[in-house]
Amino acid sequence: MLPAAGQRNGRFPLRPVGWPPPRTEIRLSVSDPPTTLNAMQITEFDASDPDRIAGAFDVLTAAHAADTPENPVPVRRFFETTFTHQWPGRARRWFAAEEEGRVVGHLSVTFHLDSNPHLAQFRLHVHPDHRKRGIGSALLDQAVELSREEGRTTLNTEAPLFWEGGPVRSEAGARFLEKRGFSRALTSVNRRCAVDAIEPSEEDRMFAEALDAAGDAYELRQWIGRTPDDLVVSLCRMDTMILSEVPLGELDVEPEESDVEKIRAAEAVNEAEGLIMVDSVAVDKATGEIVAWSGIGVDEGPYTAAHQGITIVDPAHRGHRLGLLTKLANLRQLRERFPNVRTIWTDNADVNAHMIAINVALGYETVDAVGEYQRKLEA
Ligand SMILES: CC(C)(COP(=O)(O)OP(=O)(O)OC[C@H]1O[C@@H](n2cnc3c(N)ncnc32)[C@H](O)[C@@H]1OP(=O)(O)O)[C@@H](O)C(=O)NCCC(=O)NCCS
């Protein structure tokens, strides 16, 4: 999934207060096969509708179990919070497809508010027992229609893909999108690593080597949760750098300016979600600026999987092993503070050779992939 300014965990909410949520109701009669599908109804819903939120989460959980069971499970608190807390610079609207009062599919459409005015991103899931009956197509039509209404001209979403050596993936979502005018703009490969994948002596050796390569020019700083006040302005500079430095393939996405207000707002959303950020940075002693940064998100609770977020090194400071240094330091911090976490998941563009080389050295192994799909909407 796309990173964005202030968005360090690859997951992005929400709707600002006042975002107009006019309730729309679309009734579709799907006649084929008439015996198994009655009238299906698509309804917009929001935070005031806990039943539909619960129904939508059940669909997500069932889709996860059918499509990508090896990957980290959806987290209820995280999902519910996307309805109540706004991610800075984003607005999101939700639609439920229902049959006989039961949610069988859902759609979320996210708009960037202060950058990327051309872009809409959506996610759509249909309960595995209700697929191939037209529900996904109806929800996709809804995403297109809403995006057009909002004046958006680029629509993107993602779908699971099989990756060599990994578990079976149906790729039905990818084919579904390709038949509907989307093309793949980027392939991200999901990798997984045990927190103790490397022998302790080997890990010590790698850490010492990275420290050595970094020399005396840098100071390592680490924290859990909110960014320390004396580093937050510097972190904005790195956050802004993300979208111009990570490979985006054919994705039509512009870099987004970060600022302290956005970083603090994003941290507040993370806190509400129960997503605890674990960060390590290298500070250039000469300027006091952060020049390398690695962050991991941990879900509060008994979850054993953590999510590697951004790792980025300022181009002017590459070649000093700062990527490896901040990642290894962060791994140690994670292990010490969150002993319940057993694995870390990460996704990298398939062409991101430098990042992948570091991940392979740390013991990451491929699982599956995600296709980032894009479609231009004719004006
Ligand atoms: C991709 C996904 C959304 C499709 O949902 P769906 O409800 O099965 O979608 P539809 O029923 O509209 O279309 C699926 C296929 O079933 C066919 N179909 C529709 N009604 C049918 C019926 N009554 N009988 C038989 N086939 C039917 C459609 O023609 C379509 O085939 P096509 O792509 O060859 O044209 C669903 O598989 C899913 O949730 N996957 C996991 C999440 C994911 O991959 N998301 C990415 C895509 S946005």
Image (cartoon, helix red, strand yellow):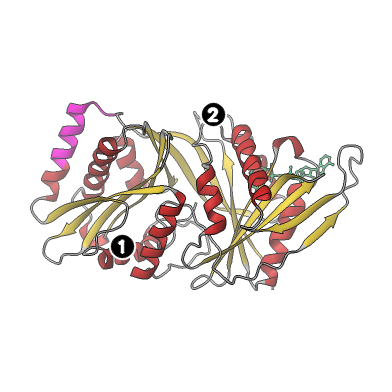
In the rendered view, tell whether residue 65 sits above or below residue 298: above
Q: Indicate the quadrant where residue 209 lies.
A: top left
Residue 177 seen in this snapshot: no
Relative horizontal placement of residue 300, taking residue 62 as reference (left or right): left
Look at label 2 and name its amino acid: Pro
Q: Main secondary structure of the magenta part?
A: helix
Q: Nearer the viewer, mark 2 or mark 1?
A: 1
Circle 2 is placed at which residue position?
A: 167
Work out whether residue 171 or residue 150 is closer to the camera in this orientation and state it: 150
Report the residue at 73% width, 64% height from top. 23
Spot occupied by residue 282 in the image (x, y as percentages of width and height): 20, 54
Residue 200 seen in this snapshot: yes
What range is drawn magenta here? 197-209
- Queried on whether the Cβ of the residue with tag 1 lies below 8 angstroms from ligand 1, the answer reads no
* Ligand 1 lies in quarter: top right
Circle 1 is placed at which residue position?
A: 238
For residue 113, which numbered disc appears in the image? none
Report the residue at 13% width, 45% height from top. 211
Work out whether residue 53 or residue 298 is closer to the camera in this orientation and state it: 53
At label 2, counting other C-alpha atoms closer than 10 Å, the crowd grade (few under 14, some 14-19, many 20 or more) is some
